[in-house]
Image (cartoon, rainbow, N blue to C red):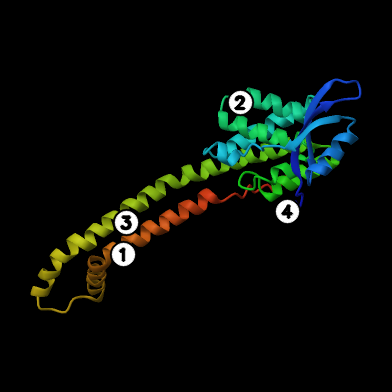
Amino acid sequence: MQSTDKRTTFTYEGQDRDGNPVAGNVLAENKKEAAAEVRKLGVAATRVKTKSNLNFSLTTQRKITQEEVVNLSRQLATMLKAGLPLIQSFDVAAESSNKEHIRTFILSLRNEVAAGRTLSDTLKKYPDIFDELYCNLVAAGEISGTLDIMLDRIASFLEKNQRLKANIKKALTYPISVLGVAVIVTAILLIKVVPSFESSFASFGAELPAFTQFVIGISEVAQEYWLQVLGILVLTGTSFAIAQKNHRGLYISSINIC
């Protein structure tokens, strides 16, 4: 279920009831509503403006990997279990990261949550990183007060999912290599070797066996259309690779959320 929250983040500066300078963020649909929200906080605002949101997708071209999602989920779960507030957990996670694109991403999440959005609604803004099921499980954790447990279970399952994918890739490497070599050898035989024997067969003047005629027919097709066949194979392989790369399914339906 997609989030319908159309509010914008506004920053404010002013003074609290004791005259101390304060600043922060609020969510509102317009500037007038933002000013009203600031007054509800007991702040005499001197400045309210639309926040220049940190657009993670524009600040970096590096994609967040599933391994990095696992690490962030595990970090947040650990810190929440230790009793740290969510905002402070984000701050610690950002400071502990030595990768600029990860730090930028974590801070973008932190700013949204600090402005009043729930974590699940914030994650829904990044569907290429967190799928719908991930967000719904986080929402369930927020509602039930077990966000730390939920994040820990999600991280554990994603780790198992990563290991499974790695094992499958490792198991498929050898047969795929053998298949590739077989295809290349077969292509060479059909395009180069069989034609050299075809003239010899024709000189015999005898009717060739059906299977031999079949092989010669395939050879003739391969010689005439080898470029088209190669193009189809390359296109199919590329399409499959792109589909695998863009596939975002996290397959976490078996997580026990109870």
Q: Which mark is residue 2?
A: 4
What's the amino acid at mark 4?
Gln
What's the amino acid at mark 2?
Ser
Disc with the residue nearer the chain's start (1 vs 4): 4
Q: Are marks 3 and 1 in contact (CB under 8 Å)?
A: no
Q: Is residue 149 above or below residue 239?
A: above
Q: Secondary structure at mark 2?
A: loop
Residue that label 3 marks: 183
Distance (Cα) linking label 2 and label 3: 46 Å
Disc with the residue nearer the chain's start (2 vs 1): 2
Disc with the residue nearer the chain's start (3 vs 1): 3
Q: Is residue 72 above or below residue 185?
A: above
Distance (Cα) linking label 2 and label 1: 49 Å
Disc with the residue nearer the chain's start (2 vs 3): 2
Distance (Cα) linking label 3 and label 1: 15 Å
Total number of numbered labels? 4
Q: Is residue 155 above or below residue 19?
A: below
> Can you give x and y, in whole percent of width and height, for residue 242 in the image?
48, 52
Q: Which mark is residue 97?
A: 2
What's the amino acid at mark 1?
Gln
